[in-house]
Amino acid sequence: MATQRVLVTGGGGYLGSIVVHELLSRGKRVRVLDALIHGGVPSLLLAWTEDGFEFARGDVRDAAARRTALRDVDAVVHLASIVGDPACARDPDLAREVNVEATRALIRDSVDAGVTRFVFASTCSN
């Protein structure tokens, strides 16, 4: 049986980088889709040396980036979001685009790509 490939959106964030390391330690292949709008988390840098790690810099709002990131993926852990009331209030249109519209699009694209497991973790911002 082939090793499971997991897409982690927002994998460059604080929680995402922890999830990435946990999945890699369990022998999963991990692809990260992240726009790095806040920069990266230094702890994700350790993953770059791991077999089975891929990084795709892209925005979860971009349909082409989503489709490319979902290629040959078995599962998705969706963590990409605008987090926190202050950030959402500062740019409510961006928050809605990322937290609501892109999430819905990612779910649809995941179904179309044959993804068998989708994990969505959210804060009150979503």
Image (tube, grey):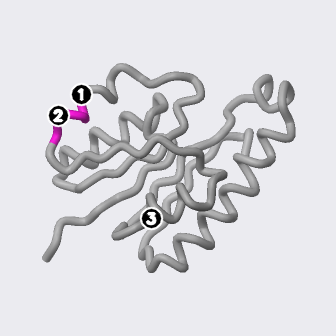
| Quarter of the image where the N terminus is located | bottom left
Q: Which residues are magenta?
A: 46-50
Helix, strand or loop under label 2: helix
Return the mark for residue 123.
none
Q: Quadrant of residue 64?
A: bottom right
Residue at the spot x=54%, y=79% of the render? 112
Q: Position of residue 46 (x, y in %)?
A: 24, 28
Compared to residue 121, the image places residue 106 above or below, namely below
Q: Position of residue 54 (x, y in %)?
A: 30, 47
Neighbours of disc 2 within 10 Å: few (<14), some (14-19), many (20+): few
Q: Count the marks.
A: 3
Give me the C-alpha separation between circle 1 and circle 3: 23 Å
Along the polypeptide, which appears first: circle 1 or circle 3?
1
Q: Amino acid at mark 2?
A: Thr
Q: Which residue is mark 3?
A: 70
Q: Amino acid at mark 3?
A: Leu
Q: Quadrant of residue 120?
A: bottom right
Give me the C-alpha separation between circle 1 and circle 2: 6 Å
Cβ atoms under marks 1 and 3 closer than 8 Å: no
User: Does residue 75 appear left or right of residue 112 in this picture?
Assistant: left
Helix, strand or loop under label 1: helix
User: Between 78 and 121, which is closer to the camera in this rendering?
Assistant: 78
Instruction: Specify the principal SS of the magenta part.
Output: helix
Q: Which residue is mark 2?
A: 49
Q: Which residue is mark 1?
A: 46
Compared to residue 90, the image places residue 110 above or below, namely below
Neighbours of disc 1 within 10 Å: few (<14), some (14-19), many (20+): few
Cβ atoms under marks 1 and 2 closer than 8 Å: yes
Residue at the spot x=46%, y=41% of the render? 57
